[in-house]
């Protein structure tokens, strides 16, 4: 069986932990709990004709006061860069963090997630923002940890990108 280390990256409170919980247990919890350090989970995905075990590293969020430890990224095969569509500034943090990760780790497969798409009435990321993200060669995928929208799709998409062609 193939096993791949995946890191969940982004600003604080963008939904990284909720996305992991959704994909692992199919649950969502309204209560917010700040991640401290790293929490590791595993999930087996069927991709094509093979099973792939994703070892999910849910890393605390980066902000102005707390920078992510790059040592957490050692050995990762892919990552999710997560932004909160209801907070425009998290897109800027995600784009800067993605560039930092690319410089430190090289070209590693990742998926850019715009989370919380269930909160359409509070959405701050406009179509121009999404075009700017796409102009950088990134394809943002809208997800909702609350409803499960595109969550499984995101993990399968990343698993496919990490498998040998």
Image: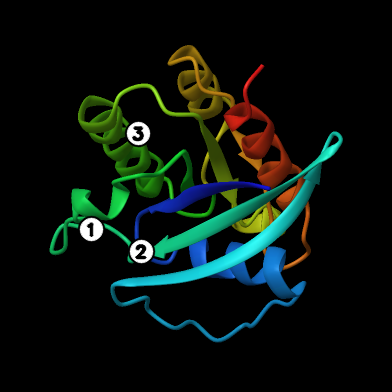
Q: List the single residue furthest toward the left.
A: 65
Residue 58 sits above or below residue 136 on the image: below
Q: Quadrant of residue 114?
A: top right
**Disc 3 target residue:** 95
- Give the secondary structure at mark 1: loop
- Give the secondary structure at mark 2: loop
In terms of sequence position, does the residue under pointer 1 or pointer 2 come before the other?
Answer: 2
Q: CA distance from mark 1 to mark 3?
A: 13 Å
Question: On the picture, is 77 further left or further right than 49?
Answer: left
**Disc 1 target residue:** 63
Please name the residue shown 13% across and 64% down the image.
Answer: 65
Please name the residue shown 20% across and 52% down the image.
Answer: 71
Image quarter where the C terminus lies is top right
Q: Residue 67, percent across and down? A: 17, 56
Task: Answer whether labels 1 and 3 touch (C-beta < 8 Å).
Answer: no
> Which numbered marker is on residue 12?
2
In terms of sequence position, does the residue under pointer 3 or pointer 2 come before the other?
Answer: 2
Query: Toward the viewer: 149 or 86?
Result: 149
Question: On the picture, is 82 further left or further right than 162?
Answer: left
Q: Residue 96, percent across and down? A: 27, 35
């Amino acid at each position: 069986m193939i096993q791949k280390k995946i890191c969940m990256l982004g600003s604080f409170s963008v939904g990284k932990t909720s996305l992991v919980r959704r994909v692992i247990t199919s649950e969502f919890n309204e209560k917010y709990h700040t991640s401290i350090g790293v929490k590791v989970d595993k999930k087996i995905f069927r991709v094509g004709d093979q099973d792939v075990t994703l070892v999910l590293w849910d890393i605390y969020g980066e902000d102005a006061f707390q920078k992510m430890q790059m040592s957490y990224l050692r050995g990762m095969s892919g990552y999710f860069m997560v932004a909160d569509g209801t907070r425009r500034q998290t897109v800027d943090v995600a784009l800067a963090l993605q560039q930092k990760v690319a410089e430190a780790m090289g070209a590693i497969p990742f998926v850019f997630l715009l989370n919380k798409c269930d909160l359409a009435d509070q959405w701050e990321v406009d179509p121009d923002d999404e075009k700017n993200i796409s102009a950088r060669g990134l394809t943002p995928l809208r997800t909702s940890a609350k409803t499960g929208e595109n969550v499984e799709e995101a993990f399968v998409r990343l698993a496919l990108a990490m498998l040998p062609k």
